[in-house]
Image (tube, rainbow, N blue to C red):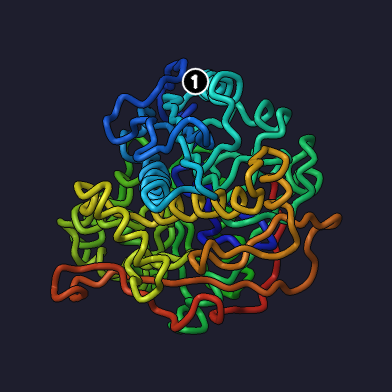
Amino acid sequence: MRRRLPHRDKRTRTARSVLALLSCASLLALTAGCGSRLPLKDFENAPSGAPAAARPPIPVGIVTSVSSPIGGDTFTGPLYGAQAFFKALNASGGINGRQVQVFTCDDSGAGIGNQSCVHQLIDSDHVVALVAGSVLDYAGAPYVSSQGVPDIGGITIGTQYDQYPHLYQIYGSDEPRDGKSVGWNGELYQTTEVYRYFKAKLGLTRAVVVAYNQADSARYAAQLAQGLQAEGYDVLSETVDFALPNFGSVAAGMKADHAQLLLDAMDTRGNSGLCQAMASAGVTVTAKVTNEQNWSEQARTDYAQTPGCRNALWVTSDARNYEDTQYPAVAAFRAGMQKYFPDRQAQLSEWELLGWAGAQWFTDAASSCGGDVTRSCVDTFMQRQQPYTAHDLIEPSSFVPMANPPTGPQHACLNVARWQDSAQGGKGGWVTQVPDMNANCFQVPALPYRP
């Protein structure tokens, strides 16, 4: 779940999301996992309606940290979205008359489990590509790259998608990715269109960044502050103890500083505690910007006790709002999820939409190969110059490397949505705030940082 701060432009890289940067090595005791087939009945590997053996199925693999110590539903969104896409695809005839056979593997959120999964899928299942992966520790990335297996539409957490060839994260990349150093000699770049948007459109100038007293949380918060300051914000930085956070003190500081924009480097527990403290102190902000991983129906229940905080939630992305069914590809996604995973309606999320988009990307790549779908053919499609939009689900994305890092102003676009309890006849939901994400653009600086 690599995320921007909190948005990522196609031409530059930014820091991971809160979940990624709160490294579980220091916050949780990760247990070594060996990787296993997903036991869930939802993810059975047999394709539906497969034709006779004369046309063998096209094997693809999906690795997901289903049983990670962070929680069972944290990483599964892309898996559900991709599975729904492939089920719908097979029902409509597959790729050039061939069904897609999906092999899934749960790496348990551990590096050894991830390595086991990629070896199983590549060496035993002989998958053509990996699709829509979302894992906590992508330790198997060097092997995937060395075998020339395209990894398409992955949600990035670590820096592997910024380092290794043949790995294609969902929002594109322009780094050299030679397998040696990350980005340009160990540096990545963040762009500041998110902060520019809230300053230009809402007139906000005073921001607060809240972090834990933990190294990765503090590092992420520093990058948030760096971007805000580059856009001319007055920034209040607050730090709380991870084990015993004093959110009352933070709320008091926000009130005294007249904070308008709230960003954080905390998990869901921390955000809930902060919102409760804000409500008790009578503190409100114009916008509380959350990360893409939290863009889901569960905001309704996650902030049930603090509706004021919930109605201040904003989110930014390089993809369509999963609720915007006016776009045909979003409508197809919603129909597929309703048909194949009807019990997921209360957990629908932007990550599920991204999983669907990743599966679409693989499908278009494989379709270009005609009857001979090979790893190298799929890889060639991924490296083409022409930007790709997953049928208008994501902003134009490509993987054309730049020899040198970005300099000068960068053209950066973004989608923006906010939660409104009044939406959907009072049911509540995420409401898009811009006419078109591809036209909501700014010229902004690119700021270097070391991950």
Q: How many marks?
A: 1
State whether residue 130 is above or below residue 107.
Answer: below
| Residue 77 seen in the current view | no
Is residue 149 found left or right of 23 in the rendered image?
Answer: right
Q: Nearer the viewer, residue 115 or 197?
A: 115
Reading the image, the residue beneath label 1 is 113
State whether residue 363 is above or below residue 98.
Answer: below
State whether residue 205 is above or below residue 52.
Answer: below
Q: Which corner quadrant holds the C terminus?
A: top right
Residue 227, position as x, y percentages in the image = 60, 64
Residue positioned most to the right? 403
State whether residue 176 is above or below residue 308.
Answer: above
Is label 1 in a helix, a strand or a loop? helix
| Residue 204 seen in the current view | yes
Look at label 1 and name its amino acid. Answer: Gly
Residue depicted at x 39% and y 57%: 350
Residue 33, position as x, y percentages in the image = 45, 17
Residue depicted at x 50% and y 47%: 97
Residue depicted at x 56% and y 49%: 362
Is residue 169 found left or right of 342 in the rendered image?
Answer: right
Is residue 321 found left or right of 409 in the rendered image?
Answer: left
- In the picture, residue 388 is in which quadrant? bottom right
Residue 392, position as x, y percentages in the image = 51, 69
Neighbour tally class for label 1: few under 14, some 14-19, many 20 plus, Cα within 10 Å: many
Is residue 322 found left or right of 341 in the rendered image?
Answer: right
- In the picture, residue 278 is in which quadrant? bottom left
Q: Nearer the viewer, residue 27 or 338?
A: 338
Residue depicted at x 40% and y 37%: 50
